[in-house]
Image: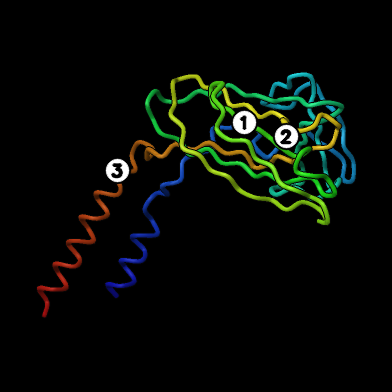
């Protein structure tokens, strides 16, 4: 019975996962018909620098949902989003990248920036591969209160480039209330353990 009570208590504790601060991180807010692609000036939550290509089941499938983007449209382009953060807090930034099938690593690079500073340049070869082969990349970044997250195509500007999807920014600092709930839960677990020990 005590084991069941302990499991129920643990299940009732709040999740440590904070909300994703990126708006439209999987590019699902803009409707794109299955099997089609279009070039847009901007997407919901994202400002395009020149333009951005939104795809649904074209040259591969999305890693999350049905849409993903390519930033080498008619030429190399970028997207960015300004995000409100807590000053000094540490955040986990993650996103999925895939080289475009049939395209060399020279054409596939994407760069990720935080407040104008390059986090990484990612590329891969899609030669001999079918569809998308998604990889998840993760970085720790520090909030300044208002932060610019941007991605740019960085390979040969030939209208063929890597895919981007499933962008997430979550705080590594627990949300208010989690510490108090966790403390109360741990105290109750300790009390239950003490009571069990005493009963022997």
Assign the N terminus to one quadrant of the image. bottom left
Relative depth, front residue between 148 and 99: 99
Where residue 56 is drawn, which disc sits there? none
Q: Mark 2 highlights which residue?
A: 29
C-alpha distance separating marks 1 and 2: 9 Å
Give residue 35's position: percent from left, percent from top. Answer: 89, 45
- The answer to whether 68 is drawn above or below residue 79 in the figure is below
Name the residue tied to disc 3: 179
Q: Which residue is mark 1?
A: 23
SS for dot 2: loop
Q: Residue at x 77, y 42 (%)?
A: 67
Which residue is located at x 56 percent, y 21 percent? 116
Colouring of the image: rainbow
- The numbered mark, 2 or 3, whose residue comes first in the sequence reads 2
Residues at discs 1 and 2 in contact (Cβ within 8 Å): yes
Q: Quadrant of residue 73?
A: top right
Q: Residue furthest front?
A: 106
> In front: 172, or 98?
98
Q: CA distance from mark 2 to mark 3?
A: 33 Å
Q: Eyeballing the image, is 142 above or below 101? A: above
Residue 13 is left or right of residue 169, and the answer is left
Left or right relative to 69: residue 174: left
Q: Secondary structure at mark 1?
A: loop
Q: Are marks 2 and 3 in contact (CB under 8 Å)?
A: no
Which residue is pictured at 20% across the width and 55% down the height?
187
* Residue 180 percent location from the top left of the image: 27, 43
Cα distance between the residues tagged 3 and 1: 27 Å
């Amino acid at each position: 019975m005590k084991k069941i009570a302990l499991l129920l208590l643990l299940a009732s504790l709040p999740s440590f996962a904070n909300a994703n601060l990126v708006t439209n991180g999987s590019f699902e807010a803009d409707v794109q018909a299955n099997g089609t692609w279009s070039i847009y000036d901007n997407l919901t939550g994202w400002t395009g620098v020149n333009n951005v290509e939104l795809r649904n089941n074209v040259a591969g499938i999305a890693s999350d949902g049905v849409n993903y983007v390519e930033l080498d449209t008619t030429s190399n382009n970028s997207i960015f989003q300004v995000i409100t953060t807590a000053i000094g807090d540490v955040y986990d930034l993650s996103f999925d990248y895939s080289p475009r099938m049939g395209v060399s690593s020279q054409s596939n690079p994407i760069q990720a920036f935080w407040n104008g500073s390059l986090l990484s340049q990612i590329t891969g070869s899609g030669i001999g591969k079918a569809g998308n082969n998604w990889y998840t990349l993760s970085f720790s970044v520090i909030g300044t209160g208002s932060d610019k997250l941007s991605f740019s195509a960085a390979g040969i500007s030939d209208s063929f480039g890597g895919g981007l999807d499933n962008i997430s920014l979550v705080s590594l600092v627990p949300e208010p209330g989690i510490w108090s709930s966790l403390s109360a839960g741990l105290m109750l677990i300790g009390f239950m353990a003490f009571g069990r020990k005493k009963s022997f």
